[in-house]
Every structure is written in C-alpha cells, then in structure tokens.
Amino acid sequence: MSPEAKGQTIGKDAKDMQELNLTVSSSPHVRCNESIPKIMWNVVAALVPAAAFGVYYFGANALLNMVVAVVSAVIFEFLWEKALHKKVTITDGSAVITGLLLAMCCPPSLPWWMSIVGSFLAIVVCKQSMGGLGYNLFNPAHVGRAGLMVSWPIAMTTWTNMDGSAAVSAVAGPTPLNAFKHGGQDALFNAFNATDWGTIYQQMFFGMRSGSAGETCTVLLILGGLYLIWKGYIKWQVPVVMIATVGVLTAIIYSPNAAVFEMMAGGLIIGAFFMATDMVTAPITLKGQIIFALGAGLITVLIRVLGGYPEGVCYSILLMNTLTPLIDRLVKPTVFGEVKAKGAK
C-alpha cells in the first residue's frame, strides 16, 4: 500500500472512531418526553373544569380569589428566588397549582387579601423556605389553608348558600357536612330541601351545594383525576383507597346511605386525587402511598366524627405528610441482588 493510500485509510479509521465515540455516564439511561413543567401544567388543566364550575356557581368573588391566589403565589416565588439569586422557576406551573388549589379549597366569599396571605404561607413559609420544589415536607396549599383557618376562623367558615346569601357554618350549618354532623339526617335533608337520598346524591355529584370554591362538583373533580391517572402522573390506588376508607368506616358508624354522602362531601375528592397524590409530599413507593391514603382516610373520619370541626381532609393529609419519611423508611424496597446477613430480621 502506498503511503498516500495508507494515510487515507488511517484518516478514515480515525474519523469512524470519532463518529462511534460513546458517552459514558451513570444510570439511569431512561428517556421520556415528560418534564416537570409538562406535568404541572397538565395538573392545572385537570383542575380548570372544577374551578370554572366554582366560578359559574358561586360568582365573581370566587374568580377574584382564584386569580389573586395564583398571581400572588407566582409573585412570591419570583421574589424569593430573585432575592436569593436562585434560578427563577415560575414558568414550571408549580406555583400556579399551589395558588389554584388554595383558592379552590377556601370559601368563595373569602376576602381577597386573605388569599394573598394564604399564598405567602404556602409559597414562602412552606415551599421555598424548605428549599423549593421537591424539598417541602408538607402540601403547600393545605399549609396555606390551615394557616388561614387558624388566623381567621370566621371568614374560613363563612359559606355562600345556594340562594347566594352568606351564612356562618358554625352557626347556621349551611354546608352539607356541618348540617349532617350537628343535625343528623333530618338537618341534611332540610339543607337540600330533599325528601330522599337520591336527590342529595344528585346535587352533590353535580356540585349544586354550598362549600369551598372548587371542591363542590364531584363529577368534574373525578374526571380531572381520571385524566391524571390516564396520563400516568398519579396511581389510581391512592384516591380509591382514601375515598373507600372514608366510605367503609362511615358506613359502619352511620349507614351505607350516609357513607355515599360522606365520600362526596367536603374536600375528600379534591384531596384524594390532587393532594394525597402529590409527588413531593407523598411516599415514593406504591405500598407507601397506599399506607398514606389509608391513614389519611382514617384521620379524616376521626376528625369528622369525633372532632369539633366537620371536615378533616386538610389536616389528615398534613398529618400524614409528617409520616411520609417514616413510611418511606419502613417500606424501602430491597436493592436488587442484595442478600440479607445471616440472622438478620
């Protein structure tokens, strides 16, 4: 082979080797089209129908609170990250979800400035002070709601009746849960102007009742949850176990008819589909998530039946959030190929 031909061959081999260069990196090597912003904005999309119904049913003040809560949540996140010279992440949709969930879980008659306070508690105190998205121990929206409940209990228990007027839950008992808790079946039937359970189920299912701005329409919340399950963002076992736990226990304590009502009442549906399934504050494994849902359902019933407050979803999820690290430790999966030491339990 001539020197010229040999040089061309060596050059070609070197070029081929350069083209076949491999990038060595640590596992995992899974690739997918999902991203944090895509997931977050899909969750927002799943919430929008129920939120829109709340605006339609309760009026302009519900819309005002939703807009104020979302905008203030985004602003607080922007200001915090700017002040600490961190990467600004307001476009990922997580702050929007927090603000929207907060407003949906509060009375539609809430003064707009309280929504700002709730967003501050949710974003600054709960989320960003713990390190930002992925580091918060508690569900931010529920922390905001719990803070408002402690600070302004009257405003947080003032609901819009079906005729558009306002009444204080602790006194007049306009919410279905409060009516049933303090007056039993007769008071519940009177609140709905109903003579049978079927009428109550129908109004509960389609959202024709008093309650928080975005948690009344059962069918739209379920459809939003089913969308997230279809997308693979949440596991169906979590909402099913939490809702079923409430249903079974209340059927034993009250009756099967009351159990169906309790499963649709209050914030159980939105809590089971959108908060108990939170990727950050819920356990990592499916087994852990089921334990979480079971515990949240149990605590919800205990608060509803034995507590002075008629609703327990918010506090049940926050209490289970504190147990998430322990649950993760208890159900930690065995490393592939690991062999237990002799005599180890």
Image (spheres, rainbow, N blue to C red):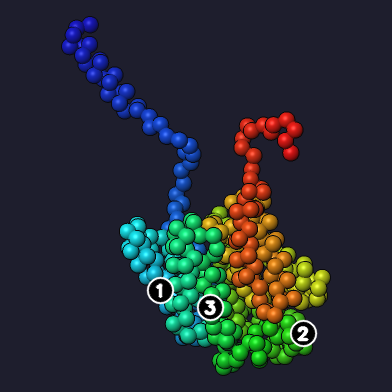
Return the mark for residue 300: none
> How much space separates mark 1 and mark 2, taking CA atoms?
40 Å
> Which of pointers 2 and 3 indicates the residue nearer the eye?
3
Q: Residue type at mark 3?
A: Leu
Question: Residue at the location (54% across, 57% down)?
Answer: 279
Q: Residue type at mark 1?
A: Ser
Q: Residue type at mark 2?
A: Gly
Q: Do tag 1 and tag 2 residues touch (Cβ < 8 Å)?
A: no
According to the picture, the residue beneath numbered tag 1 turns out to be: 72
According to the picture, the residue beneath numbered tag 3 turns out to be: 148
Residue sitting farthest toward the left = 4
> Which of pointers 1 and 2 indicates the residue nearer the eye?
1
Name the spot of residue 133 as percent of width and height, x first.
46, 58
> How much space separates mark 3 and mark 1, taking CA atoms?
15 Å
Q: Quadrant of residue 106?
A: bottom right
In the rendered structure, the answer to whether residue 60 lies left or right of residue 249 reads left
According to the picture, the residue beneath numbered tag 2 turns out to be: 184
Question: Residue at the location (77% across, 84% down)?
Answer: 185
Looking at the image, residue 90 lies above or below residue 102: above
Identify the mark nearer the N-term, 3 or 1: 1
Depth order, front residue of 147/200: 147
Question: Residue at the location (67% across, 31% down)?
Answer: 339
Query: Secondary structure beneath disc 2?
Result: helix
In the rendered structure, the answer to whether residue 289 lies left or right of residue 87 reads right
